[in-house]
Image (cartoon, rainbow, N blue to C red):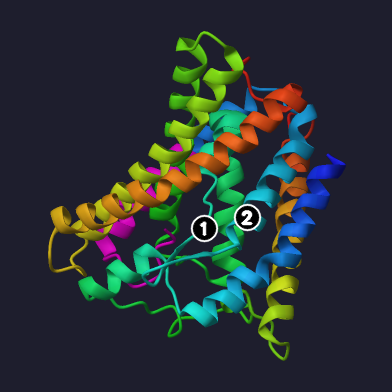
Amino acid sequence: MHIPDGYLDLTTVFITYTIFTIYMMYTLYKLKNISYTEKTSLLAVVSAGIFAAQMLNWPIVGGTSLHFVGGALAGILLGPWLGTLSMFLVLFVQCIVFHDGGITTLGANMINMGIIDVLIGIIFYRIGEKFSGSRDFGCIIGAFLGGWLGIALAGIACGLEIGFSSQFAYGWVLATSVMGMWHLALGVIEGIITALVVAYLVKRAPELMYWGAD
Amino acid sequence: MRISIIVILALIVVSPIFGVILADMVGYHEPLDVAAERLGLEDVTDLFNWTPFIDYTVPGLPATIGYIISGLIGIAMIIGLVYVFSKLTSDRL
């Protein structure tokens, strides 16, 4: 999912950085208006946990692999603004310290994993929470759908970015199909992990969950 | 919170099994890498590199140990950035 340097042309880099910068500025503006005194340590733990989880690459028969991305989980646990900030911290450190994901593609990677994945995660989590008879069950189903579809849509966005780049000769239809199908299939695992973590926290530590108070 | 820290450290300790040992055995890539290879995209990460810790390695250390050290460095960096951010936004965060 981390797009490396060299995959995107200058125009795509400029557009993705512009979107990312505007969204990040809005995120910081929203965080300015919210008192999160008690959430500093939660932000650190969730960000560090996602970073650690992303280091576990799971091999899949056929020569590919997957790792947990965690954008949806960050959104569900921290809310949309701190969730995006959490993913930014993870992606920034990965990019700057380990060159995992390019510096020219940080904007695109943030759009995919730090904005789309986070927002889709929250949206489906909220739908599950709202329309289920039991709050616990709804949260778990919502978390599963959010984790799964968050990755699938992030994969499609990744395909669009690569497809629109002039570096790629075959166009966005092929790129989005390839990336979309792959992540729709592999995203099921992301959904299951997200649902398991949420199921545990809803039962054992509901005070850590973001319930949309702000 | 204490359990979370233990789980994170445990993940870092076992991470080389998945990130290094199995990776070498199976020779796998992420879906994006596989797709990019088929689509003819060129990864220039190695040509324009600025960090000694590229791909979670530490110069002079075996890959497995380097992977664990990299994990600890990454976590320290993230916690440090959260601290800096919380200081910059004073009592807000």
The span picked out in magenta is A1-24
In the rendered image, the quadrant that contains the C terminus of chain B is top right
Q: Tell me where residue A105 appears, x and y as whole percent.
A: 40, 61
Q: Nearer the viewer, residue A95 or A140?
A: A140
Q: Dot 1 corresponds to which residue?
A: A67
Tags 2 and 1 both on a single chain: yes
Mark 1 residue type: His
Quarter of the image holding residue A149? top left
Asked if residue A44 lies in the magenta stretch, the reply is: no
Q: Main secondary structure of the magenta part?
A: helix
Residue drawn at x 27%, y 55% is A159
Tell which subunit mark 2 falls on. A
Q: Which residue is mark 2?
A: A53
**A2 falls in the magenta region:** yes
**Could you tell me if residue A111 is visible in this image?**
no
What crowding class fits label 1: few (fewer than 14 Cα within 10 Å), some (14-19), or many (20 or more)? Answer: many
Left or right: where A36 falls relative to A89: right
In the image, what residue type sits under mark 2?
Ala
Q: Give the residue furthest to the right.
A: B2
Q: Residue A127 occupies which quadrant of the picture?
A: top left
Q: Secondary structure at mark 1?
A: loop
Q: Is residue A144 above or below residue B67?
A: above
> Please, which residue is most extreme toward the front here?
A61
Residue A134, position as x, y percentages in the image: 57, 11
